[in-house]
Image (cartoon, helix red, strand yellow):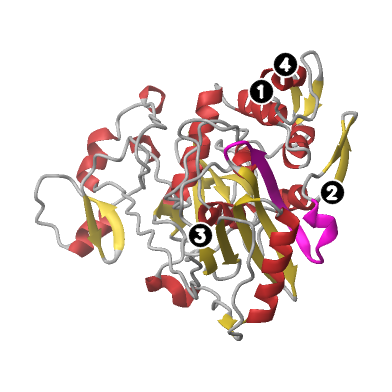
């Protein structure tokens, strides 16, 4: 049965922690070289990476913080003043700027200083490496600052919840652009898709859904996550990678879609990312995972950390390509929200909208036919497996407004997306 959802508001209310002064003093003398930050992809999604997950949570002045288990006689103002963020104790999923945050080129004293991000509603995502006073982060970008990787001073940031623009909540809805208004009573068109989510980019609101939260195989829309994780972790697209993955071997084994790489070649990361996003190369996805992480398993763990950091409750990855596998699933809504986040990155937007590309001698054509058949279409990714059938997260822009249409188990991607986009433009006003 169809369900019109005029304004779905996310309820992702994750708590993040920093440490009270007493606990901070107890570990401050621990050499950074002796500290290891653990990661467990099998754990339930948490607001904290495991090193902080055991701490008790309290709230002071509306800011999520962490206090020692022992009672304290300090008042809230006193305790809040002594709280500091120490990355050696574990990394939260997000950090918020408490003052203007310079973006440094490195952790050492000789690093160059870039344009500072303003305090307030600025959020960055920790990547893990840190020095004595700086932490490497990914900034998702805003209207004045492009997305990118940098180092920030730990004194300029504090752990926070998921940024409100990523996971809109009723408490913070006033800080976001208003959702478009329904101006027509015309019902959504019939389509062949079983699972549908239509999301407004600006407000993040679900405009319409049919079983939008069902956990189902997502096929190669998985590569949205594989690609944005690569851009966050290794933004140098000219990086050369020695190929160890055989496309012909993958085709023979499971019929994978490939870009055609074979061992003995050297290709750029840029070529591999295009190979993932355009011809949907499983060989490219596997090669990126192997090359950028210490192991394929670690890369998949990064993908699951990404899902947790975005508040995607119905998503779990078991591989970087999207092949059917136990524990590999998502929902139409989650994939739309993942794409909305990824499209904040200008390089990702270029990859998602490119129709043809040649890199390192590999000519490629984008399998997303909507890019050339629907006016304003500018992304994002299609997929197909036996279990998932045809899937897509489509993006289209009209009069400065972007909308995402996410379909699972469709029989006609172009026809279904065209009908739904046309209905949105006719039925909503910004």
- Measure how far apart labels 2 and 3 are at the Cα level: 28 Å
Residue for point 72% across, 16% down:
249
> Contact (CB < 8 A) between labels 2 and 3?
no
Is residue 186 shown above or below 334?
below
Kindly identify which numbered label has been placed on residue 249.
Answer: 4
Of the numbered discs 1 and 2, the one sitting upstream in the chain is 1
Of the numbered discs 2 and 3, the one sitting upstream in the chain is 3
349 lies left or right of 298: right
User: Is disc 4 placed on a helix, strand or loop?
Assistant: helix
Point out residue 2 in the picture as x, y percentages from the top left corner.
Answer: 51, 68
User: Is disc 3 placed on a helix, strand or loop?
Assistant: loop
Point out residue 78 in the picture as x, y percentages from the top left corner.
Answer: 20, 60
- Of badges 1 and 2, the one in the foreground is 1
The quadrant the C terminus occupies is: bottom right
Point out residue 55 in the picture as x, y percentages from the top left corner.
Answer: 23, 43
> Contact (CB < 8 A) between labels 3 and 1?
no
- Residue 391 seen from this side: yes
> Contact (CB < 8 A) between labels 4 and 1?
no
- Measure how far apart labels 2 and 4 are at the Cα level: 27 Å
Residue for point 29% across, 66% down:
62
The part of the chain drawn in magenta is 369-387
Of the numbered discs 4 and 1, the one sitting upstream in the chain is 4
Kindly identify which numbered label has been placed on residue 285.
Answer: none
Where does label 2 land, which residue?
355
Where does label 1 land, which residue?
254
In the image, 267 versus 355, the foreground residue is: 355
Where does label 3 land, which residue?
166
- Measure how far apart labels 1 and 2 are at the Cα level: 26 Å
User: Is disc 2 placed on a helix, strand or loop?
Assistant: loop
Q: Residues within 10 Å of mark 2 (few under 14, many from 20)?
A: many
């Amino acid at each position: 049965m169809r369900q019109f959802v005029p304004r779905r508001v996310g309820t992702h209310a994750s708590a993040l922690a920093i440490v009270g002064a007493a606990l901070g003093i107890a570990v401050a003398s621990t050499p950074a070289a002796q500290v290891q930050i653990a990661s467990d992809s099998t754990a339930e999604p948490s607001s904290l990476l495991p090193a902080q997950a055991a701490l008790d949570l309290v709230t002071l002045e509306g800011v999520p913080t962490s206090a020692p288990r022992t009672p304290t006689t300090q008042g809230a103002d006193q305790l809040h003043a002594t709280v500091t963020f120490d990355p050696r104790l574990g990394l939260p999923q997000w950090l918020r700027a408490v003052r203007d945050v310079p973006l440094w080129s490195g952790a050492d004293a000789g690093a160059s200083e870039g344009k500072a991000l303003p305090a307030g509603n600025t959020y960055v995502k920790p990547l893990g490496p840190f020095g004595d006073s700086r932490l490497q982060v990914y900034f998702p970008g805003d209207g004045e600052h492009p997305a990118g990787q940098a180092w920030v001073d730990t004194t300029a940031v504090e752990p926070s919840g998921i940024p409100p623009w990523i996971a809109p909540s009723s408490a913070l809805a006033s800080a976001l652009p208003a959702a478009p208004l329904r101006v027509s009573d015309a019902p959504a068109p019939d389509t062949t898709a079983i699972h549908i989510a239509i999301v407004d980019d600006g407000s993040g609101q679900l405009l319409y859904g049919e079983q939008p939260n069902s956990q189902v195989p997502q096929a190669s829309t998985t590569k949205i996550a594989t690609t944005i994780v690569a851009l966050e972790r290794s933004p140098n697209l000219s990086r050369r990678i020695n190929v160890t993955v055989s496309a012909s071997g993958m085709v023979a084994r499971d019929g994978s879609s490939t870009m055609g790489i074979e061992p003995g070649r050297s290709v750029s990361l840029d070529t591999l990312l295009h190979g993932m996003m355009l011809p949907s190369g499983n060989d490219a996805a596997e090669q990126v995972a192997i090359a950028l992480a210490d192991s394929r398993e670690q890369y998949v763990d990064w993908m699951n950390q990404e899902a947790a950091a975005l508040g995607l409750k119905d998503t779990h990855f078991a591989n970087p390509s999207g092949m059917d596998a136990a524990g590999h699933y998502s929902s139409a809504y989650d994939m739309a929200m993942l794409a909305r986040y990824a499209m904040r990155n200008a390089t990702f937007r270029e990859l998602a909208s490119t129709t043809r590309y040649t890199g390192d001698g590999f000519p490629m054509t984008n399998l997303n036919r909507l890019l050339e058949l629907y006016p304003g279409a500018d992304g994002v990714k299609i997929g197909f497996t036996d279990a998932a059938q045809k899937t897509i997260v489509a993006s289209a822009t009209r009069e400065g407004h972007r909308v995402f249409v996410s379909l699972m188990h469709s029989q006609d991607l172009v026809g279904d997306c065209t009908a739904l986009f046309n209905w949105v433009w006719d039925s909503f006003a910004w």
